Image: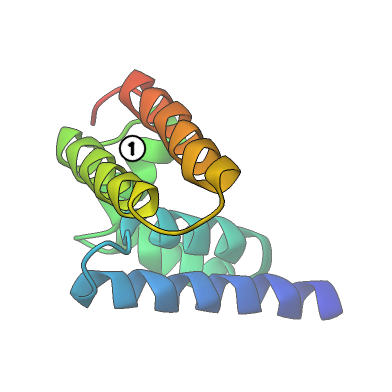
């Protein structure tokens, strides 16, 4: 019972973050919706089914599940947001290991993203 509740809470939190991402620039939407469907599949099958059948969010979720695919637009937007974040971080007074390490991590993520198949 507790496990089911935790899966549902994760699904709801991810879905809320995804919805916030629709109106808040810089916060991705689709990864959170994919996470919500994944968590829903473990604790809330009706939510998972609803997300998979949704006309807007269903196709990206199915593309990710079936092929690990991302749309080219999502790749460009995520890369742009990471580049802007890295530039802001480099200009900040954060400690040097953070100013160097975090952009390196973002670069690794960007490389991984661009190696994914396209939807």
In the visual, does 117 lie left or right of 68? left
Residue 44, placed above or below residue 108: below
Question: Front-most of 36 and 90?
Answer: 90
User: As drawn, is 3 to the left or to the right of 97?
Assistant: right
Q: Residue at x 27, y 62 (%)?
A: 26
Of residue 45 and residue 38, the one placed in the foreground of this image is 38
Rendered position, 20 above or below 78: below
Counting every numbered tag in the picture gives 1
Q: Where is residue 4 in the image (x, y as percent from the top left)?
A: 75, 74
Query: In the visual, does 8 lie left or right of 16?
Result: right
Tell me the element at label 1.
helix
Which image quarter holds the N terminus?
bottom right
Along the viewing direction, whichever of 111 and 96 lies nearer the viewer: 96
Percent across and percent down for residue 61 are 37, 48
- From the top left corner, tell me how far across and down residue 50 is, in percent: 39, 68
In the image, taking residue 62 as reference, residue 100 lies left or right, namely right
Residue drawn at x 40%, y 30% is 107
Q: In which quarter of the image is the C terminus?
A: top left
In the rendered image of this protein, does residue 115 appear above or below residue 108?
above
Residue 1 shows in the view: no
| Residue at the image point whose x is 20% and y is 76% from the top | 23
Question: Can see residue 100?
Answer: yes
Name the residue: 73% across, 75% down: 6
* Residue ID for mark 1: 63
| Residue 65 quadrant | top left
């Amino acid at each position: 019972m507790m496990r089911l509740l935790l899966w549902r809470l994760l699904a709801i939190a991810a879905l809320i973050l995804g919805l916030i991402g629709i109106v808040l620039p810089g916060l991705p939407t689709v990864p959170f919706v994919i996470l919500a469907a994944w968590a829903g599949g473990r604790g809330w099958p009706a939510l998972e089914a609803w997300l998979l059948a949704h006309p807007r969010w269903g196709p990206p979720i199915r593309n990710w599940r079936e092929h690990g695919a991302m749309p080219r637009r999502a790749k460009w937007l995520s890369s742009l947001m990471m580049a802007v974040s890295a530039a802001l971080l480099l200009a900040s007074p954060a400690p040097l290991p953070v100013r160097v390490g975090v952009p390196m991590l973002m670069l690794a993520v960007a490389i991984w993203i661009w190696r994914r198949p396209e939807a």
